[in-house]
Image (cartoon, rainbow, N blue to C red):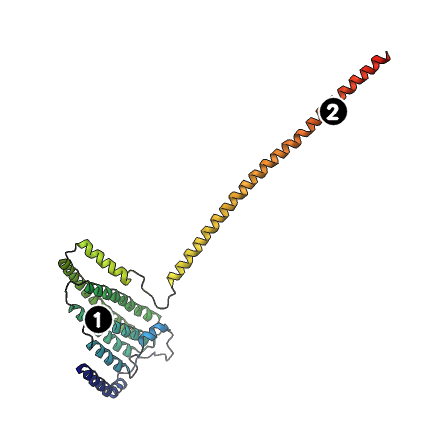
C-alpha cells in the first residue's frame, strides 16, 4: 500500500513539473541550425527514429526522463537496474543521431549528456552487484557485457553520421567529435567495470563449487552460446544475411545435384555409344564376308560346267 501511495505522489509531482519543463525547453540556448537554411540531406533509418521516440526538442522529453527515473527507482535488483540503464542510454544515443541529422546540435548535446549519465549510473549498479557465487550472476554479467559491446559499436556510427551530414562548420564538427569521444569514454569505462566484476564472480563460483579453470570457462562459453553473444550484431538498415546464405547453400546443392545428373547421363551415353559401335562392327564384318562366299559358289559352278563339257567331247569321239 505504501508503494502505491509513493507512486501516486511521484506521478502528481511529475505532472506539476510539465509546465516548468516546457518553459525550460523554450528558454534553452538557440538551436544550431544549418547556416545555409537548407533541409538536412541525411536520412535517418525508420528504426532509429522509432527507438529515439520523444527527442530533446520536444516539451515531453523531460517527462519521459522523469518516468524512466521512477522505473529505475522501483527496480531493486542491481543487475536489472544496469540493464534498464543501458536501454535508456541506447535511446539517448538514438536521439543524438536524430538531432545531429536535423543539425540541432544543442539538443543533441543534451541527449549525449543524459546518455553519459545513464551509463555512469549503470556502471555504479554493476559495481554494487553482490558476489554470492551464483551462476545467475555470471549469466547477467555476460548479457550486460554483450549489450555494452553492441552499444559501443553503435556509438561509432555517430561518426559516420557526421561524415554524411553536409555543410557542417568546423565548430559543429568539433562539437560532434567531442560528443562521440565522451560517449566512447563512458562506454569503455563500463566495459572495464563489467569485465572486472565478471572475473570476480567467476572466482567466487570456482571457490563455492570447487570448479577448475577449464570448467568455469566452459560454463561461460555455454552461457554465451545460449545468449547468442557470438552471433553477428544486427545492423539497422541491412538485409537478412542468414536467409541469403541459406538460399546460396540451396543453390549450390541444386547445382551439385545437376552436375551429378549430367555426369550420370554422360556415362549412359558413352555406354550406349560403345554398344552401338560394337553392333556396327559385327554387322560390317558380316557384310564383308558375303562376297567371298558368292565367289566360292561361282568357282564350283564353273568346274562342274567344264566336267560336263569334257564328257560330251568323249561321247562324240
* Quadrant for the C terminus in the image: top right
User: In this figure, which residue is indicated by the disc labeled 1?
Assistant: 80
Evaluate whether residue 44 shows in this view. Answer: no
Above or below for 248 versus 28: above
Q: Residue at x 27, y 59 (%)?
A: 225
Q: Quadrant of residue 190?
A: bottom left
Q: Secondary structure at mark 2?
A: helix
Q: Are marks 1 and 2 in contact (CB under 8 Å)?
A: no
Asked if residue 279 lies left or right of residue 148, the reply is: right
**Residue in front for this viewpoint, 42 or 79:** 79
Q: Quadrant of residue 34?
A: bottom left
**Residue 253 at x, y percent in the picture:** 43, 53
User: In this figure, which residue is indicated by the disc labeled 2?
Assistant: 298
Label 2 crowding class (10 Å Cα cut-off): few <14, some 14-19, many 20+?
Answer: few
**Residue in front for this viewpoint, 305 or 281:** 305
User: Of the residues under marks 1 and 2, which one precedes in the sequence?
Assistant: 1
Amino acid at each position: 500500500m505504501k508503494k502505491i501511495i509513493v507512486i501516486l505522489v511521484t506521478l502528481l509531482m511529475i505532472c506539476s513539473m510539465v509546465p516548468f519543463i516546457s518553459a525550460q525547453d523554450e528558454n534553452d540556448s538557440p538551436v544550431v541550425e544549418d547556416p545555409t537554411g537548407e533541409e538536412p540531406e541525411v536520412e535517418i533509418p525508420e528504426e532509429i527514429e522509432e527507438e529515439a521516440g520523444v527527442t530533446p526538442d520536444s516539451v515531453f522529453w523531460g517527462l519521459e526522463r522523469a518516468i524512466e527515473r521512477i522505473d529505475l527507482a522501483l527496480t531493486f535488483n542491481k543487475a536489472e537496474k544496469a540493464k534498464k540503464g543501458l536501454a535508456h542510454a541506447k535511446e539517448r544515443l538514438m536521439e543524438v543521431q536524430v538531432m545531429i541529422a536535423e543539425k540541432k546540435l544543442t539538443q543533441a548535446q543534451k541527449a549525449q549528456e543524459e546518455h553519459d549519465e545513464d551509463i555512469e549510473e549503470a556502471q555504479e549498479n554493476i559495481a554494487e552487484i553482490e558476489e554470492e557465487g551464483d551462476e545467475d550472476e555470471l549469466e547477467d554479467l555476460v548479457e550486460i557485457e554483450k549489450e555494452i559491446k553492441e552499444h559501443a559499436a553503435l556509438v561509432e556510427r555517430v561518426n559516420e553520421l557526421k561524415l554524411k551530414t553536409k555543410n557542417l562548420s568546423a565548430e559543429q564538427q568539433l562539437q560532434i567529435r567531442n560528443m562521440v569521444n565522451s560517449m566512447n569514454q563512458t562506454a569503455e569505462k563500463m566495459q572495464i567495470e563489467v569485465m572486472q566484476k565478471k572475473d570476480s564472480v567467476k572466482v567466487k563460483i570456482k571457490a563455492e563449487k570447487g570448479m577448475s579453470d577449464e570448467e568455469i570457462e566452459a560454463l561461460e562459453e555455454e552461457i554465451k552460446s545460449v545468449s547468442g553473444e557470438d552471433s553477428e550484431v544486427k545492423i539497422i538498415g541491412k538485409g537478412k544475411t542468414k536467409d541469403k546464405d541459406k538460399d546460396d547453400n540451396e543453390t549450390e546443392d541444386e547445382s551439385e545435384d545437376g552436375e551429378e545428373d549430367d555426369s550420370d547421363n554422360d556415362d549412359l551415353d558413352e555406354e550406349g555409344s560403345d554398344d552401338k559401335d560394337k553392333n556396327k562392327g559385327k554387322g560390317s564384318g558380316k557384310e564383308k564376308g558375303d562376297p567371298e562366299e558368292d565367289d566360292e559358289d561361282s568357282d564350283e559352278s564353273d568346274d562342274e560346267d567344264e566336267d560336263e563339257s569334257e564328257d560330251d567331247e568323249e561321247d562324240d569321239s
